Image (cartoon, rainbow, N blue to C red):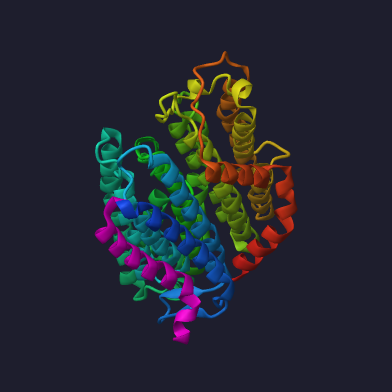
Amino acid sequence: MDYLAPILPEVILALGAIALMLVAAFGGRRSTPVTTWVAVLLLLGATAALIGAPSNDGPLFGGLVSADWFSSFGKAIIFPAAAVAVLMAHGWFERGTEHSAEYPVLILFSAVGMAVMVSSTNLMSLYVGLELSSLSSYVLASYRRMDDRSAEAGLKYFVLGALASGILLYGISLLYGFTGSMNYSGLAAAFAREGAQSMGLLFGLVFLLAGIAFKVSAVPFHMWTPDVYEGAPTPVTAFFATAPKAAAILMGVRVCIEGLGPAIDAWRQIIIFAALASIFLGAVAAYGQTNIKRLLAYSSINNVGFALVGLAAGGTAGTSSVLFYMAVYVVMTIGAFLCVLWMRDANGEPVEDMASLAGLSQRRPAFAAAFAVFMFSLAGIPPLFGFWAKLVVFNAAVGAGLIALAVAGILGTVIGAYYYLKVVKIIYFDDPAEPYARTREPVEGVLMAVAAIAVSPLGYLLIGPLGSLSDRAAGALF
C-alpha cells in the first residue's frame, strides 16, 4: 500500500465521496447537515494529509501523475477553498428547499478532479481530471432546478464546456500523433528536437492552450463567465471563481513549463496576448455592470490576466509568482463572495444589485469595512496584500525582460481600479438604500474576518513563508 501514500489526499476524498453518496441516496434531504460537515472534515483532512504524504516521489503510475511540491501547493489552495464553498452553501440554501445532500458530494468529486489536474504529468490524466471536475461543475451551475437563471447557466456552461473539451482533445490528439507520447517529458523532448519547424506540433500546442484558456476563462474564451457566474447560486459562483480557477491555472503552468518548455518562444506569444486581453477586457467590461456577481466575474477574468503575466515570464521566478498570486487571489475572492452572501433583503432573499449597498457603512460598519478591504485588495491598492501579489508577477515579468508587458499590466491595474472603487463609493458615500436583513451565520462571519485580516497589511507577515513555499513548489518543475 506504500504506492498509495503519495496520493493519500485523493484517496481520502474519493472514498469519502462514495460513502457520502450512499448516505445521500438513503438519507435524502434529512442527511444534508451530516454530508455537509463530513465533507468539510474530509477536505480539511485531505489538506492535513498533504503534510504526511510524500512530496518528492516524482512520477507515479507510469508517469500519469507526479507527487511533488508543486502539486501539494495546488492542493493546499484547492481543498480549503472547496471546504469554504461547502460551508457557504449550507447557510445560503437552508431557507429554501433546494439544498440537498448531494451538493457536498459534487464538491468532493470536483476536488478529486482538480487534485488530478494539478498533479498530472500526462495528457490523458490531465483530461480525466479536467472532465471529472467539469462534470460536477455543470450540475452545480444548474443546482437550483426551479430557477430559470440557474438552469440557463448550467446549459450554457455544459454546451460551451463540451466545445472546449473537443478543442482540447483535438490538441491532445495532434500532439500525440506528432510526438508518439502523452507524457510531458516526451512532449518536451519532441519540441526540443523539432521546435517551431513542425507545423503539426505548433497546431497541437495552440489547440491545447485554447482548451485550457476556456477553463481559466481567459480572453477570448471568457464568454461563458459572466452569465454562468450570475445565474449559478452564489456559493457555487464563489466555488467556480476560486478552486477550479486555481486548479486550471496551475494545470496550465505545469503543461507549459514541463511539457512545452522548449517551445517557450511559441507559447509565450499566446500567453502574452491572452494576459493583456484578459486584463483590459476584464477592466473595461466591468464598468457598466450593476450586478455584483457579474462584476466579480469580470474581476476574475481580469485577475487571470495578471496570473498569466507571471506565466509569460517563465522560469522559476515566473512560476513562483503565479503560485503566490493564486494563493492570495483565492483568499480575496472568497472574502468578496462571503460579503455577497450577506446581501439579503428584509425578507431574507438574496440581493445582487450593487445599488442596494448604498449606505451600508452607516448601518453595518464592520460588514462595510470588510467589503471595502476586499475591493481595495482586488484592485491592488497598497498597503493591502493584493498589491504585493501584483507586484510579484510584475517583478517576474521585468526580470524576464518583458518590461512592456509589465507596464501594460500596471496600466490595466489603474483602469480596473475604477469599478472596485465604485463599489466602495456606493457603500460609503451614496444615500442609504433599504437595509439588509440581519444574518445569523457565525461561521461565515468568522471566515470573512479571517479573510479580511489575511489580505490586510497584516498579510505582509505571510510574505516570507508563502514566498518560500512558492519558490520550493516552482522549483519542482525544473
Q: Residue at x 61, y 29 (%)?
A: 368
Q: Is residue 450 visible?
A: yes
Q: Which residues are magenta?
A: 1-29
* Camera-side residue of 206 and 79: 79
In the drawing, does residue 95 fall left or right of residue 424?
Answer: left
- Of 68 and 172, which appears nearest the observer? 68
In the image, is 36 to the left or to the right of 30?
right
Q: Give coordinates of residue 143: x percent, y percent.
A: 30, 45
* Percent x, y of residue 400: 65, 55
Q: Quadrant of the N terminus?
A: bottom left
Magenta run includes residue 332: no
Is residue 135 placed above or below 16 in the rendered structure?
above
Residue 477 in sight:
no
Q: Is residue 172 above or below residue 445?
A: below
Instruction: Specify the principal SS of the magenta part.
Output: helix
Q: Residue at x 30, y 58 (%)?
A: 24
Q: Closer to the camera, 383 or 256?
A: 383
Classify the position of the C terminus by image quarter.
bottom right
Q: Residue 382 sits in which quadrant?
A: top right
Q: Position of residue 17 (x, y in %)?
A: 36, 64
Name the residue furthest bottom. 1
Vertical position of residue 288 compared to residue 319: above or below? above
Name the spot of residue 189 as percent of width and height, x first.
46, 75
Q: Residue at x 43, y 28 (%)?
A: 351
Q: How many marks?
A: 0
Residue lying at the far top of the rendered structure: 431
